[in-house]
Image: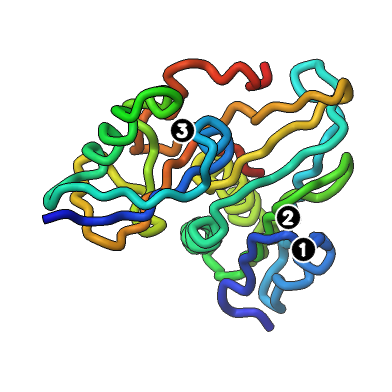
Amino acid sequence: MSSRVVHCSVGPDVILPSDVLARVGADEDGAALLFVGVVRNHADGRPVSGMRYDAYVDMARKELAVIADEAAERLGTKRVAVEHRTGELSIGDVSVAIAVSSPHRAESFDAARYVIEEIKKRLPVWKREHYEDGSGGWVEGTIPPGTGRGALVQPDAERGP
Amino acid sequence: MTLSVNTLFFASYRDLVGVSELVVDLSDGSTVGDLVATLRARGAPWDALPEEPAVAVNQTYAFLDEPLDSGDEVAFIPPVAGG
């Protein structure tokens, strides 16, 4: 069975969560967890019709592998599988799937949570919401820890709320 | 002597400056901070880039005092929003 960090990907392919989950697990594992991030139809009370994910793909692949390695240390196993999608997504589409497994549940919960929180803090990925009224805007993001102050000096007029 | 770096812009920064990639010549010994200052000195719309943006050099997050070498890939990283 799996014995190392099995899988990390960033790209336009459709994510099949059951396939991601199937990549982890071992006879010694009593816990397997799957987290799925899904495009929802609203943001700050505004109807959303879809989302575009842009990425600095080469760096995002490396950074995601680093995050998975850090999670593996928390997990006590190296059974971590993560996929992050890019491109145009519709409501209900899966944008990210994270699967982990470990002998006991605590480590799996901790590691899966760690991966999604670190993705949000530091993976070089951006998303642009398409609103029902035909307008759009970049989702206000998070400045990666230990880096600069990223807000534009003059607010971008097109930027969403 | 000059050095030449390839700068990359993503998402809201790319929308702002209108390009996704730009080769910039700098004097030897320049840092990431010098690159940011050089670009902002071009005037609008470049002066709307943050004075202290998050930046990655050769796909690793870097500080503004990091020295640059010719051929480096320097990406301006807007606040991230993955997940």
Tell me how far mark 2 sits from mark 3, CA to CA: 23 Å
Q: Chain of mark 3?
A: A
**Residue A100 visible:** yes
Residue B62, how many percent across, how many down? 31, 47
Asked whether the residues under the numbered discs 1 and 3 touch, taking CB atoms below 8 Å apart as contact, a structural biologist would say no
Where is A11 relative to A55, above or below? below
Camera-side residue of B23 and B83: B23
Kind of element beneath mark 1: loop
Q: Amino acid at mark 1?
A: Asp
Which of the 4 image quarters holds residue B47? top left
Q: Which mark is residue A13?
A: 1
- Left or right, residue A128 beside residue A5: right
Looking at the image, tell me whether mark 2 or mark 3 is earlier in sequence order.
Answer: 2
Residue holding disc 2: A97
Tag 2, which secondary structure? strand
Instruction: Name the residue beneath numbered marker 3.
Output: A143
Does the residue at mark 2 contact the one at mark 3 (Cβ under 8 Å)? no
Q: CA distance from mark 2 to mark 1?
A: 12 Å
